Amino acid sequence: MTAASPTPEASSPHVMNTYGRLPIALSHGQGCHVWDTHGKCYLDALGGIAVNTLGHNHAKLVPALQDQISKIIHSCNYYHVPNQEVLAKKLVELSGMCNVFFCSTGLEANEAALKLARKFGHDKGIERPEIVVFEKAFHGRSIATLSATGNPKVQAGFGPLVEGFIRVPLNDIESLKHATAGNPNVVAVFLEAIQGEGGVNPMHLDYLREVRSLCDARDWLMMVDEVQCGMGRTGKWFAHQWAGIVPDVMPLAKGLGSGVPVGAVVAGPKAAHIFQPGNHGTTFGGNPLAMRAGVETIRIMEEDGLLENAARVGAHLSQGLATALAAELACGSVREIRGQGLMIGVDLTKPCGALVQQCADNGLLISVTADTVIRLVPPLIMTQAEADDVVRILCPLIRQLLQVQ
Ligand SMILES: *Cc1c(COP(=O)(O)O)cnc(C)c1O
């Protein structure tokens, strides 16, 4: 424990300047709280962007990871990694799907999904496969996944984009039918069940069912990016399960390893045998540390009833926000509070990026996305009392922001 921790104020001339960072460096955490290097305490309603499923320093996770680190961290995919089978079997049970490819991040899981869709097409004799994607979507920052992303800011400066995407608006089945009419090259529809970065925008459950039927009728893959909304956050294991459907391809990451980088792409019967040896691979993916983190995260979530907790505390938090902001909702300065479970967006009528620092000053970590949307994606262990604290700190700052011209 001798490594010097740099002060948060120090600029980082050797770190590429890709983030507008807050002048805060976190040093440690416990449960839903974190402390910075000056000892200031924050309530964590961001969870490292929907990653820290079990919060910080979890009493069951930490010893398991310590045990794993002392045994083997990485071995590589030239050998069997027994916990790959354990975690894959678990994900297959929870999703009702068939098999799993492991990687390390969300964009890699989506990249694998896009490759699956293209090869699905090629295997059917479609030389130039096309994939339906959505306005405001976010799928990652590799060249292929930023091309699938529906945000010009993410794409600016990185052209030429990857071709073969057809973009449609959310929750409008007629647009989807119209955009694909008579096109024999379509192979897949790729969507987030609840868009995260795009502003916490849920796909309607009816719409998900309509997309499922259309994909069945046309022999397309339904690919649901659950990187942010999956892994119990909405109160079900996967957000699409609220619609009672099963996708053909499901990328996962973020919350899957509770902070250890783990990504996965889960495949149903239509996609399970597309990849053959040599078609895809990764050095880090599925390594023993990552797999142990995934196995233990799910085990602890089940033991501690965290799906139920996410549903219950999420409903309590949404209700608390709606009550505290009743006047603003009535007059329309707060447009909407939306989401499911512990994935909540508060959509304001004005840009609210300034709230991130103001909340931090008041001991609360949040994020703002799509300019006007406060995003709350806390650890799934959050208590009702902590949810009440979120409301108590956040809502006066929202009111104050809305009052300033
Ligand atoms: C965060 C996110 C990604 C990208 O994940 P990375 O691990 O940052 O590559 C992809 N899709 C969705 C829905 C996400 O929220």
Image (spheres, rainbow, N blue to C red):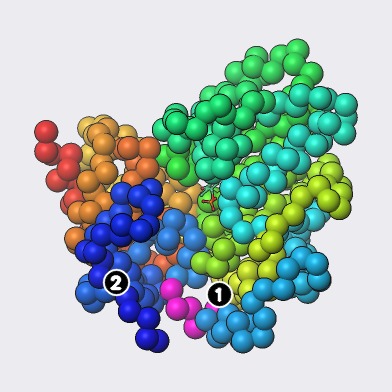
Q: Quadrant of the N terminus?
A: bottom left
Residue 249 image point, x, y percent: 72, 45
Residue 317, quarter of the rendered image: bottom left
Q: Which mark is residue 6?
A: 2
Q: Is residue 47 left or right of residue 306?
A: left
Q: Quadrant of the C terminus?
A: top left
Q: Is residue 26 left or right of residue 342?
A: left
Above or below for 22 versus 33: above
Name the foreground residue: 307 vs 35: 35
- The mark total stands at 2
Q: Residue at x 48, y 54 (%)?
A: 341
Q: Residue at x 13, y 39 (%)?
A: 403
Q: Residue at x 66, y 85 (%)?
A: 71
- Label 1 to label 2, Cα distance in Å? 36 Å
Q: Which mark is residue 12?
A: none
Q: Secondary structure at mark 2?
A: loop
- Determine if the magenta segment contains residue 107: no
Residue 179 image point, x, y percent: 64, 17
Q: Secondary structure at mark 1?
A: loop
Q: Which residue is mark 1?
A: 304
Residue 83, quarter of the rendered image: bottom right
Report the span colored magenta: 56-61
